Image (cartoon, rainbow, N blue to C red):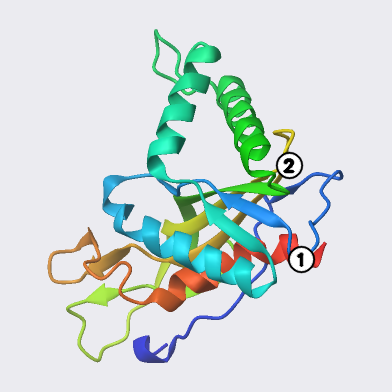
């Protein structure tokens, strides 16, 4: 397989997408509030603004009114709600307490919805997910991309196994704080193979191609628009 000939194409949506039976898509012109984008590692922070812009534009194009909650307001409300539930990390092990996390998120969403009269609240994230490699393509979360390689020249290379793919993670809440949708959309492969050093390394051009983030947002929103 020629490295330059392996293009991206859509693949099956993630099997671990979760959509509640109570989900009802709000009518166009309704207000959707976006919470600040969360990132899994510091390397991904430059992508937060790109993600927010892509999500805002996609929802606005579909006829929704969209506002993004500012970081200051979010941080203030979030710290209060985390304190109310007794913290979201186990004080002894440091392990994330999933129940308390969702409880705090639900309370935050209720407060934001009450103040803004939002029909829905979305919590976007940039997350690292397992991607399966076959040849020089990797597939994950509805996406297929060529595995980036440095130092290969015009030769061919094939590989099998797994790597990490970067995805949009999207939580969708009703004004009552109920989580009714949890989806993923593959964006890009953040690591490249350095043939010269035989190591994987973080790409320096992670968010240089804005269309990759737009692709991921579109995949993550497919269940939202198709139900």
Residue 72, picture quadrant: top left
Q: How many marks?
A: 2
Q: Position of residue 169 (x, y in %)?
A: 54, 52
Q: Residue at x 18, y 63 (%)?
A: 198
- Left or right of 188: which side holds 84? right
| Image quarter in which the C terminus is found | bottom right
Dot 1 crowding, Cα within 10 Å, few <14, some 14–19, many 20+: some
Q: Position of residue 207 (x, y in %)?
A: 33, 68
- Where, by quadrant of the figure, is residue 5 drawn? bottom left
Mark 2 vs 1: CB contact within 8 A: no
User: Which numbered disc covers residue 174?
Assistant: 2
Residue 79 vertical placement versus 56 (above, below): above
User: Residue at horizontal 40%, vertical 75%?
Assistant: 210
Task: List x then y, in percent, for residue 179.
Answer: 70, 38
Classed neighbour count for the residue bearing mark 2: other residues with Cα under 10 Å, few (<14), some (14–19), many (≥20)? many
Which residue is depicted at the point 73% across and 49% down? 119
- Residue 122, placed above or below residue 85: below
Residue 136 visible in rendering: no
* Earlier residue among tags 2 and 1: 1
Residue 151 visible in the snapshot: yes
Which numbered mark, 2 or 1, is in the foreground of this view? Answer: 1
Q: Is residue 67 left or right of residue 42?
A: right
Instruction: Look at the numbered disc 1 and give the secondary structure of its residue.
Output: loop
Q: Check disc 1 and report the residue beneath it.
A: 28
Q: Quadrant of the N terminus?
A: bottom left
Image-quadrant location for residue 184: bottom right
- Please name whichever residue, 173 or 208, is drawn nearer the observer in this view of the structure: 173
- Looking at the image, which residue is at 72% across and 39% down? 175
Give the secondary structure at mark 2. Answer: loop
Q: Position of residue 178 (x, y in %)?
A: 73, 35
């Amino acid at each position: 397989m020629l490295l330059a000939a392996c293009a991206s194409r859509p693949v099956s949506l993630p099997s671990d997408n979760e959509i509640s039976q109570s989900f009802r898509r709000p009518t166009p012109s309704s207000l959707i509030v976006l919470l600040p984008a969360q990132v899994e590692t510091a390397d991904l922070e430059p992508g937060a603004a790109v993600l927010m812009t892509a999500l805002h534009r996609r929802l606005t194009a579909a006829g929704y009114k969209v506002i993004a909650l500012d970081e200051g307001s979010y941080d203030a409300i979030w710290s209060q709600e985390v304190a109310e539930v007794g913290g979201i990390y186990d004080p002894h092990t440091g392990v994330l307490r999933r129940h308390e996390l969702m409880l705090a998120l639900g309370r935050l969403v209720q407060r934001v919805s009450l103040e803004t009269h939002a029909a829905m609240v979305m919590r976007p994230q940039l997350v690292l997910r397992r991607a399966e490699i076959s040849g020089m393509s990797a597939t994950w979360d509805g996406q297929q991309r060529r595995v980036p390689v440095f130092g290969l020249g015009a030769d061919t290379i094939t590989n099998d196994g797994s790597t990490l793919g970067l995805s949009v993670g999207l939580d969708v809440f009703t004004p009552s704080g109920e989580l009714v949708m949890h989806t993923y959309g593959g964006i890009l492969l953040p690591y490249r193979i350095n043939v010269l050093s035989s190591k994987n390394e973080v790409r320096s051009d992670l968010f240089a191609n804005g269309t990759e983030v737009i692709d991921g947002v579109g995949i993550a929103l497919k269940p939202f628009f198709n139900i």
